[in-house]
């Protein structure tokens, strides 16, 4: 239960919390700041009320993805394919359909992140076409990579050895029993 409190939560709490985690995951794909090696119990608050800010955020992200899928179904079948692949691969590990072993882990975003990258590339290609500039997409990607280097370097340092990882787990998830267990 301490690795995934959603596994023992009522179905409504599991779904509302999973939707909120979906919003968090999408945020990490867009801006990968605040990465952490542990998301066990004590790091992600459960969502009991769908009308709370966390519940509404999860619902808003789900609705935005559905609206994007409807729009892509009419305009771009390639982008729709990648959106559906990312959404379905995320759905399998999101705790919405069935509880899994962990409440959330960044490793669960591997396949959805590939879909996200392809969608971002398709979007940047469209922007470059509209601007009639072959440099728009490479310039945008270069600026993003340069902006994210400091965070990537900081995150990379925590994986140096077992002790730096354990200390980072406790520092970034102080309410996690799992993080304290690893450090012990």
Image: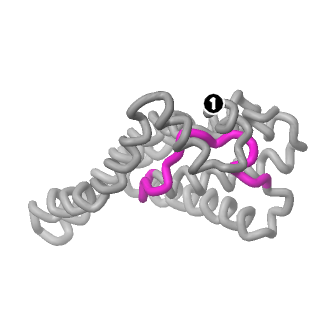
* Image height of 13 relative to 103, above or below: below
Residue at 57%, 49% (x, y): give it.
171
Q: Does residue 11 appear in the picture of this structure?
A: yes
Tag 1 residue: 182
Residue drawn where x is 90% and y is 43% of the image: 10
Q: Is residue 116 left or right of residue 144?
A: right
Q: Is the C terminus in the top left, top right, bottom left or bottom right quadrant?
A: top right
Please tell me whether residue 13 is drawn above or below residue 100 in the rendered image: below
Q: Nearer the viewer, residue 25 or 36?
A: 36
- Classified by dominant secondary structure, the portion drawn in magenta counts as loop
61 left or right of 107 in image: right
Which residue of the protein is positioned furthest toward the right in this rendering? 10
Residue at image position (62%, 38%) is: 91
- Asked whether the viewer can see residue 90, the reply is no
Answer whether residue 41 is magenta in the image.
Answer: yes
Q: Position of residue 46 (x, y in %)?
A: 79, 52
- Position of residue 106 in the picture relative to residue 16 (left or right): left
Q: Quadrant of the N terminus?
A: top right
53 or 129: nearer the eye? 53
What colouring style does the render use?
one colour
Residue appearing at x 48%, y 60% in the figure: 71
Q: x and y percent of residue 43 in the render?
A: 69, 49
Seen from the viewer's position, the closer of residues 158 and 111 is 158
Image spot of residue 156 (x, y percent): 36, 41
The segment highlighted magenta reads 29-46
Quarter of the image where one finds residue 180: top right
Horizontal arrangement in the rendering, residue 23 relative to residue 129 (left or right): right
Assign a secondary structure to mark 1: helix
Based on the displayed image, in which of its 4 quarters is residue 133 positioned? bottom left
2 in the magenta segment: no
Front residue of 38/183: it is: 183
Q: Position of residue 21 (x, y in %)?
A: 65, 51
């Amino acid at each position: 239960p301490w690795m995934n409190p959603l596994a023992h939560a009522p179905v409504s709490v599991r779904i509302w919390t999973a939707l909120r985690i979906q919003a968090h995951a999408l945020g990490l794909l867009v801006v990968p700041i605040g990465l952490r090696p542990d998301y066990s119990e004590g790091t992600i608050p459960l969502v009991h009320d769908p009308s709370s800010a966390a519940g509404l955020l999860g619902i808003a992200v789900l609705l935005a993805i559905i609206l994007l899928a409807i729009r892509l179904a009419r305009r771009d079948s390639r982008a729709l394919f990648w959106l559906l692949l990312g959404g379905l691969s995320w759905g399998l590990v999101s705790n919405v359909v069935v509880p899994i072993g962990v409440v959330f882990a960044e490793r669960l975003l591997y396949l959805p992140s590939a879909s996200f990258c392809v969608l971002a590339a398709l979007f940047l290609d469209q922007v470059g076409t509209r601007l009639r500039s072959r440099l728009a997409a490479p310039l945008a990607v270069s600026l993003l990579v340069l902006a994210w280097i400091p965070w990537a370097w900081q995150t990379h340092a925590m994986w140096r050895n077992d002790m730096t990882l354990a200390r980072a787990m406790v520092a970034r998830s102080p309410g996690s029993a799992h993080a304290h267990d690893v450090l012990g």
